[in-house]
Every structure is written in structure tokens, then in C-alpha cells.
Image (cartoon, coloured by chain):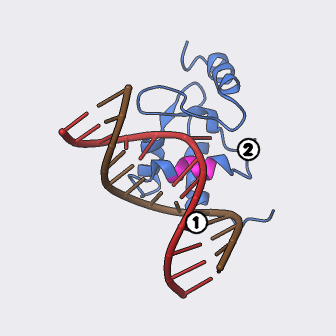
Chain colours: A blue, B red, C brown
DNA sequence: AAGTAAGAAATTT
DNA sequence: AAATTTCTTACTT
């Protein structure tokens, strides 16, 4: 299972990593930061295969509606992390 | 290389 | 809420 991190993934990780603790961003927001507005889905894909799990706070990325959407580790995990950061509380 | 399948979204009606 | 659209990666041929 070797996958080479592409430029797209790299940008996604960088953008998500920039998210300050206690705040959430939307997939569209990240997609726009990397210059691929509209690729929100692709962003989710990159996070799903994120080889930088502890580096990339994918749990800080939520949908535009404020819903958690999906999560590789489970939505419960995301909810807990966000609650701890006070992002949704 | 080309085509197909799937993925955690967003937008529009 | 349902249907449609859009982007990228991975697998298969």
C-alpha cells in the first residue's frame, strides 16, 4: 500500500494543518485555499487517505451545513475532538 | 494510456 | 429531500 502524496494532497494537508485549534473549516473552504474550489469532494478523499493522520486534523473539517459529514475514524471521534476544542460546544 | 468505480461535498430545483 | 454536478485517487483492462 504505497501511495505517493500528490500535489493536491500536499496542499490539502497544508491547508487543514493551518486550521487553528477550536475552529472548524468546510471542505469548500479548504478546497478554495488550495486553489481547487469545487473540489471539496477531492479534499475529503485526500483526508480519507491522509498519511499524516496526527498531523492533519481532519476532524476540524466539516461540511458547509455544519454537519460532520463522514469520518474515517468514526463521527463519534470527530464529535469528541471538536467538543474538546470547543468548536461546536 | 484509457476507462471505470468510488469517496467524508456542494449546488440547484 | 432528491437529483445533478464536480474533482481526485485507485484499480482494471
Q: Position of residue A77 (x, y in %)?
A: 71, 25
Name the foreground residue: A70 vs A84.
Answer: A70
Mark 1 burial class by Cα count in 10 Å: few <14, some 14-19, many 20+? few
Residue A16's place in the image compared with B5, above or below, is above
Magenta: predominant secondary structure element?
Answer: helix
Residue A78's place in the image compared with A2, above or below, is above
Q: Is residue A2 visible?
A: yes
Disc 1 marks which residue?
A7
**Image check: A24 left or right of A75?**
left
Residue A46 in magenta stretch:
yes
The magenta segment is A42-47
Name the foreground residue: A41 vs A89.
Answer: A41
Q: Secondary structure at mark 2?
A: loop
Residue B1's place in the image compared with A43, above or below, is below
Q: CA distance from mark 1 to mark 2?
A: 17 Å
* Same chain check for tags 1 and 2: yes
Q: Chain of mark 1?
A: A
Q: Position of residue A54 (x, y in %)?
A: 75, 41
Mark 2 burial class by Cα count in 10 Å: few <14, some 14-19, many 20+? few
Q: Chain of mark 2?
A: A
Q: Quadrant of the C terminus of chain A?
A: top right
**Image check: A5 left or right of A1?**
left
Name the foreground residue: A1 vs C11.
Answer: C11
Q: Position of residue A16 (x, y in %)?
A: 57, 44
Q: Position of residue A81 (x, y in %)?
A: 68, 23
Residue at the image position 53 percent from the left and 50 percent from the top = A43
Disc 2 marks which residue?
A53
Q: Secondary structure at mark 1?
A: helix
Q: Is residue A13 visible?
A: no
- Which residue occupies the extreme right position in the image? A1
Q: Quadrant of the N terminus of chain A?
A: bottom right
Amino acid at each position: 500500500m504505497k501511495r505517493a502524496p500528490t500535489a493536491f494532497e500536499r496542499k490539502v494537508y497544508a491547508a487543514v494543518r493551518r486550521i487553528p485549534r477550536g475552529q472548524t473549516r468546510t471542505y469548500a473552504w479548504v478546497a478554495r485555499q488550495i486553489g481547487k474550489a469545487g473540489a471539496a469532494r477531492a479534499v475529503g478523499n485526500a483526508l480519507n487517505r491522509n498519511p499524516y493522520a496526527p498531523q492533519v486534523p481532519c476532524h476540524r473539517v466539516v461540511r458547509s451545513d455544519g454537519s460532520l459529514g463522514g469520518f474515517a475514524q468514526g463521527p463519534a471521534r470527530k464529535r469528541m475532538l471538536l467538543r474538546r476544542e470547543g468548536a461546536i460546544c
